[in-house]
Amino acid sequence: MTDHDSALRPKVADANQQSRQRLASTSGNPPEPPARRCDECWDIKRRRAAALRADDRQEAARMTTAMGVHQRRAH
C-alpha cells in the first residue's frame, strides 16, 4: 500500500459515512449494515485472480464457471 492509499482510506471511509447519514436522514430509515461476505465467493475470486496472474487461462475459466454455479446455487 502506498502512502497515497493510506491517506485516502480514512477520507473514503468518512465520505461513505457521510453518504449513509444523508441517505438515512432523507429516507427516514437507517442504512442497512453491509451484508457479510460469502467466504466461498471470495475463495473463488482469489483463485481466479491467482490463475490470471499466472496466465493460467484454463483455471481462470474454471473459476469463472465455478462462480456462476455457486451464485445460482447459493445466492
Image (spheres, helix red, strand yellow):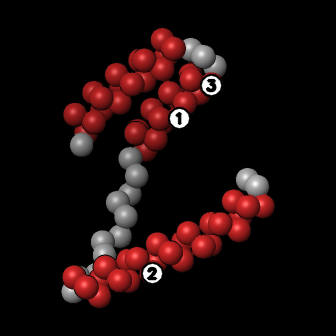
The reply to whether discs 2 and 1 touch (Cβ–Cβ < 8 Å) is no
Name the side, left or right, on which 48 lies relative to 72.
right
Residue 18 numbered mark, or none: 2
Q: Please state which of the two labelled residues, at mark 2 or mark 3, is closer to the viewer.
A: 2
Q: Nearer the viewer, residue 2 or 44?
A: 2
Q: Residue at x 46, y 41 (%)?
A: 42
Query: Who comes first in sequence, dot 2 or dot 1?
Result: 2
CA distance for labels 2 and 1: 31 Å
Outermost top residue: 58
User: What amino acid is at disc 3?
Assistant: Arg
Image height of 61 relative to 30, above or below: above
Query: Who comes first in sequence, dot 3 or dot 1?
Result: 1
Q: Quadrant of residue 11?
A: bottom right
Query: Who comes first in sequence, dot 2 or dot 3?
Result: 2
* Residue tagged 1: 46
Q: Please state which of the two labelled residues, at mark 3 or mark 1, is closer to the viewer.
A: 3
Q: Where is residue 32 drawn, in percent x and y?
A: 30, 72
Name the side, left or right, on which 26 lies relative to 16.
left
Q: How many discs mark residues in the rendered view?
A: 3
* Residue tagged 3: 53
Image quadrant holding the C terminus, namely top left
Name the side, left or right, on which 28 lies relative to 70.
left
Residue 16 numbered mark, or none: none
Q: Where is residue 50 drawn, in percent x and y?
A: 59, 27
Which type of secondary structure does the marked residue at label 1 adopt? Answer: helix
User: What amino acid is at disc 2?
Assistant: Gln
User: What amino acid is at disc 1?
Assistant: Arg
